[in-house]
Image (spheres, grey):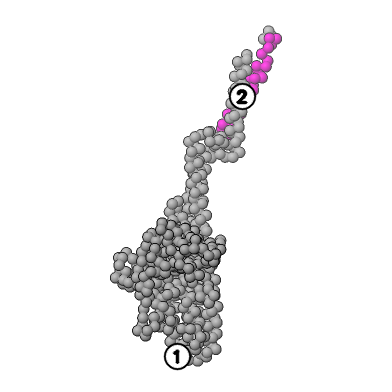
Amino acid sequence: MINITDQIMFNLGNLDKENLRITYQTATGKILQKGSDDGAVFTKELYFDDKIRVYQGVHEQIKRAMTLNDSVDSTLANVKEELDIIKNSMLKTLNAGMQPSDKLAVATQIEGIKENFFTWANTSINNEYIFAGSNSTKQPFVKDANGKISYVGDNVLKQVPVEPNSYRDRGVTGFDAFMYTSDSAKVGEPLEFLASERIVDNDGNTWAFPESSGVGEKLDFFATDTITDNNGTTWTLNALDSKLEDGNGASLDLIKLNGGYQFKSNLSDGFQDGLGVSVTSFNATSASAPALEIRQYDRYGNLTGQVLAVTEIDNGDGIVDGGDDTGLLEPKYRTANVSDPALILESKHNIFNDLDDIITTLNGKSLSDGVTPIEEAEQNDIIRSMLDKMTATFDAVNIAHSKVGSRNKIIQDASVNISAKITNFNILSLENGQINYAKVAMEAKALEMTYTAMYSTIAKMNNLNLVNFLK
């Protein structure tokens, strides 16, 4: 009798477990309550959930990239509209009936457009500058005390994942959006460039004269360079090539980098030399001067060790200047012939400099000093030449705009593709882990009948006593 009772209780316990399973599945629609319920189903569920999370993460990044690209697209559209206004206004100033006061009004209008460009060039979306390049937290265009605007970003495009471990470029940099190519050179050719222009190559590297650095920055230099600080103190390499020393006890730690050196840490605010004098900047001067050279910096601003000899262009008048048709007395240089067959150099001209020249000219001032008055004939000649530069500017912005459109289309297509994959994996996950309601209903009915039979048996056993047996 005891054995029968134990067996009945054991069977009731199993029925209760089965009831819990059926109740859970009916309430949630899921097969598994615990992973141990079915190892094969659970493994597939983990796989599908992982895929869904990965693709949802990719999709979120794509949506942010699309927002940024849309902002770039609208900004460049605005820039092109304003460039058309500038060109039309410049053409009007060439009419015979235009008075100096009318030209001053146009200069004021273009000054306002220039400020719009400066604001748009520093557009930020979600605390990310859209034209900055790799370091999107740093303002890409800065204005000095004289109002000159320069680009301090780099030539590296941010990328967005379109699939796990697959990336595409997004947006454009300041080089594309607010600069145009003034000259280019391939193997066997020299490159000519103005002092204010930036030089880039086909691999995204930049080329520049020996650099200077200030607080919060590092200095790259060669062993042959002369390193001086803002106080005129010369710093030299120690015997171990591990530090720069000023001879008075102060030193800076270095790391070796591609045949050159770099400060190990950014120059800190409050740094002092060995005599306790504050140092705010360092400058590297080529030891080969006056035989100048430009140096290649990789896409992230580090020396690569490649150099190219440079000479200043003398126009034959004894004055080394830009020699361009605006009369702007800006130093101009020519490199040695490019020797690397794979290398293509381009000099990038900042459109803000052209706008400054246009404004100065319309104000009736000389570009050589910004003060000396000029004759109307010279003024008109300069404006005509600047119209060509505005055309080059518009073409560059238009190309950048088309690149953004192409990149945005790729990212939009990727968004559709990723959305479809998320949907498919969700369906597969449901199909893998979802109950068969008809099957569960049948199991529930069978369980109900088993319970009924079990309790009927228990009721009859309660009547199995000696008196009833004797009856």
Task: State the count of labels.
Answer: 2
Q: What whole-number distance in Å separates the C-alpha atoms at marks 2 and 1?
A: 109 Å
From this view, report whether residue 305 is shown above or below residue 109: above
Q: Which of marks 2 and 1 is in front?
A: 1
First in residue order: circle 2 vs circle 1: 2
Secondary structure mostly taken by the magenta-highlighted segment of the chain:
helix
Residue tagged 1 = 377
Q: Which of the 4 quarters of the picture holds residue 221? A: bottom left
**Quarter of the image containing the N terminus?**
top right
Residue tagged 2 = 12
Helix, strand or loop at disc 1?
Answer: helix
Magenta run includes residue 446: yes
Which amino acid type is marked by label 1? Ala
**Magenta span:** 441-468
Q: Position of residue 379 (x, y in %)?
A: 46, 87
The answer to which of 358 and 148 lies nearer the viewer is 148
From this view, report whether residue 154 is shown above or below residue 163: below
From this view, report whether residue 219 is shown above or below residue 7: below
Q: Where is residue 216 in the image (x, y as percent from the top left)?
A: 52, 63
Mark 2: few/some/many CA within 10 Å (<14, 14-19, 20+): some
From this view, report whether residue 183 is shown above or below residue 21: below
Which amino acid type is marked by label 2? Leu
Is residue 128 visible to the viewer in this orientation of the structure? no
Is residue 165 visible to the viewer in this orientation of the structure? yes
Q: Which residue is drawn at 47% across and 53% down?
A: 418
Q: Looking at the rendered structure, which numbered label has been put on residue 61?
A: none
